[in-house]
Image (cartoon, rainbow, N blue to C red):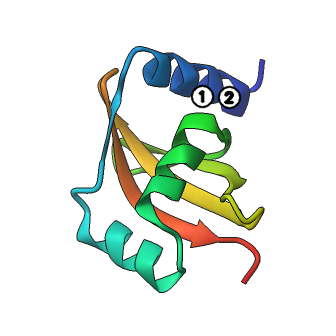
Amino acid sequence: MSDTQNATFDLRAMVVSGAKITWEVHHAREQAALRNVQLVEAERVVRTGTVTRIDLVGSQIRWRISGWDSDSRPVDVVVRPVGNSVLLVITVIRTDE
């Protein structure tokens, strides 16, 4: 399995076990609004999307999760997994713009 496949597996396990998706980073909410992506749509991408990129920022891992909103627009959500129970949304990206 590739690193992104392993991360997607870990993401699915977190979602199934009830991981909380948090929007504590103000930038994330701003970018979602600026890019016309509703928070509920971004959260759905986190729950159902695929990890397409893994970045190490300092000592923190970030996953870029790709999926689509309800209008079939491609949306990426960058999250930082915190332990096994929290997914902290860092930013939201529309990849069709």
Where does residue 25 sit, x and y in percent of width and height?
26, 62
Q: Residue at x 77, y 62 (%)?
A: 72
Q: Residue at x 36, y 21 (%)?
A: 18
Q: Is residue 96 above or below residue 18?
A: below
Q: Relative to the observer, which residue lies in front, 62 or 90? A: 90
Label 2 or label 1, whichever lies nearer to me, is 1
Q: Is label 2 in contact with label 1 (beta carbons under 8 Å)?
A: yes
Looking at numbered disc 1 in the image, what kind of residue is underneath it? Ala
Q: Which residue is mark 2?
A: 3
Looking at the rendered structure, the secondary structure element under dot 2 is helix
Where does residue 28 sit, x and y in percent of width and height?
36, 67
Where does residue 91 sit, x and y in percent of width and height?
44, 65
Q: Residue at x 48, y 17 (%)?
A: 16
Disc tally is: 2
Q: Which mark is residue 91?
A: none
Image quadrant where one finds the C terminus: bottom right
Q: Which mark is residue 7?
A: 1
Looking at numbered disc 2 in the image, what kind of residue is underneath it? Asp
Distance from the alpha carbon under mark 2 to that under mark 1: 6 Å
Q: Determine whether, in the image, residue 20 is placed left or right of residue 91.
A: left
Looking at the rendered structure, the secondary structure element under dot 1 is helix
Q: Residue furthest front?
A: 70
Where does residue 79 sit, x and y in percent of width and height?
44, 48
Which class describes the residues within 10 Å of circle 1: few (<14), some (14-19), or many (20+)?
A: many
Which class describes the residues within 10 Å of circle 2: few (<14), some (14-19), or many (20+)?
A: few
Q: Relative to the observer, which residue lies in front, 18 or 11? A: 18
